[in-house]
Image (cartoon, rainbow, N blue to C red):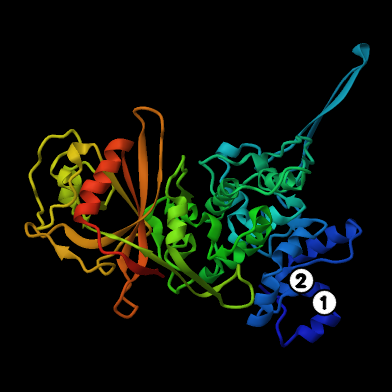
Amino acid sequence: MPLTTLESNLAQHLDFVPWDSLPPTFRDAAVIVKALGLEYLWIDSLCIIQDSTEDWELESSKMANVYGGAYVTIAAVSSPDFRGGCFSKSGKPDICHRIRREEEGLDVIIGLRDSAASSPDKLNISAELPLLSRGWVYQERMLSRRLLYCTRSELQLICRQGRGCECGRGSAALHRIETAKTYPTARDKQAYSAPLFAQMNPGQGRFGDLEAAIHWHKVVSEYSKLELSYESDKLPALSGCAKDISLLAGGEYLAGLWRHTLARDLLWDVHTQSSSRRPAEWRAPSWSWASVKATGGVTFAELAESAHLRTFLDRVTAIECQPRGKDPTGSLQSASIRLRTRLYEVSMRRVCYADLKIRSRGRLKHLIESQDMTKSTDGTPIPDRCTFEDRGLPLWGGTIRVGLNPDFEYGLDTFPWNRAKKDQGCYQAKIFLLHVCDSQVERVGKEGVDYFLALKRNSQAPPGDVYERVGLVRVIGKSDVRQRWLVEVLDQNYRTDEQEVILV
């Protein structure tokens, strides 16, 4: 960035910013603002003192007001950086053809325009619309009342109630990019704003916990796929949306989760473990989705009726979230959850290549140890290549299934692993399961799910009951069988005594 506001040039910038010093995108934005008859232009790198932590924390906490209160937000979506500008430089003119037949009274002009955004299924988002892959841009798009998109081929105007573009196609192709094939997903602005509009309708009342949670989960799922230049910006770059959505149901914000929907919000998992890791520096507690860098994003479990949501919250004795600055939705200094509960101590296996191939487990590398691991997927016995003293959970002939979704790619330094007695290929480690809630299905013959957080003891904390989250575990089976298994297998053989557990 050739030009930023620093403490050293703040006085000069308050008086005058030389036009020639502005990069192309900034100059084009100023031209647009003047053409619209507006007086002020906000540019983050000029309006925030870039080498002042205090000013950055103060101004970044106001993003919901800055973008929500702006007359229009100008987005150079086809520009890779400040040098690309807002106006098209493709050099491809419109093609116009006139058809005239005097005897028939026909005189029309047909115009054709080359549009890179005309085919969403073939569009390379990161190449054609690089701005939409940036994490900070997500809340800017969602909070702004109006967006002026500067694409390679035309200008497009999107607001909370409609869309328009130069080509005359009212439904701009840019905002039809909502399929799972695209990267990143460009959520429809109307979809984001719809709950807020419903809230303003007389007699609508406040959003319920379920509706607010579903709305927030969609926001996080979309945002978590985007890129950030600085890993520490994970929570600040979404703080505006957090403040915005707090208007729906209120509640206390907890490192990307909400206290009143805490049990639901904990049920996140990463889309692809092999591309997920912990950031180099701590930025969020392990129980928050913000604690992992997941290029494929995170998703949340969809619950049917659950009997344990309230029970889980009742077990929580204290929650601490200490912000780094004054913004409770911004960067964190520390965070923890204390609850009085019982854990289940089980074994997890790091599967070697031979076991992985023989058991047809696909790409799964880490599994909850079970006695059914001695059978192939079709139920036939297979050679026991790697053996451990702990034979694992009995799954009652396959009527119960236990699945582990790691939060990140485990390394050999993640756990104190035990080698297998035989072949030395597989490894085994102890983990602890914390029951969160179930998802009941009342239809006959359908299976339900119980959700557990997979925990390990925190190696950085003093000896005690301090744990960190490492994954999400699902126990799947028909409700009557699953409930019996939870009591007769987990409770009787793997449950620890009730204790105060601290999650960090």
Residue 235: name its quadrant. Answer: bottom right
The Cα–Cα distance between marks 2 and 1, rounded to whole angstroms, is 7 Å
Q: Position of residue 328 (x, y in %)?
A: 61, 70
Q: Residue at x 37, y 63 (%)?
A: 469
Identify which amino acid the numbered label 1 is placed on. Answer: Pro
Task: Kindly identify the residue that appears in the image at 24 percent across and 51 percent down.
Answer: 490
Examine the rendering and report whether any part of residue 360 can be seen: yes
Q: Which residue is mark 2?
A: 22
Residue at the spot of label 1: 18
Horizontal relation, residue 408 to residue 152: left or right: left
Q: Amino acid at mark 2?
A: Leu
SS label for mark 2: loop
Of all residues, the one furthest to the bottom in this rendering is 8
Q: How crowded is the residue under tag 2: few (<14 C-alpha within 10 Å), some, or many (20+)? A: some
In the rendered image, the quadrant that contains the C terminus is bottom left
Toward which corner of the image does residue 119 lie, by quadrant?
top right
Within 10 angstroms of label 1, few (less than 14), some, or many (20 or more) residues? few
Q: Nearer the viewer, residue 10 or 16?
A: 10
Residue 436 got which mark? Answer: none
At x 63%, y 51%, the residue is 129
Q: Secondary structure at mark 1?
A: loop
Residue 19 vertical position relative to residue 105 in the rendered view, above or below: below
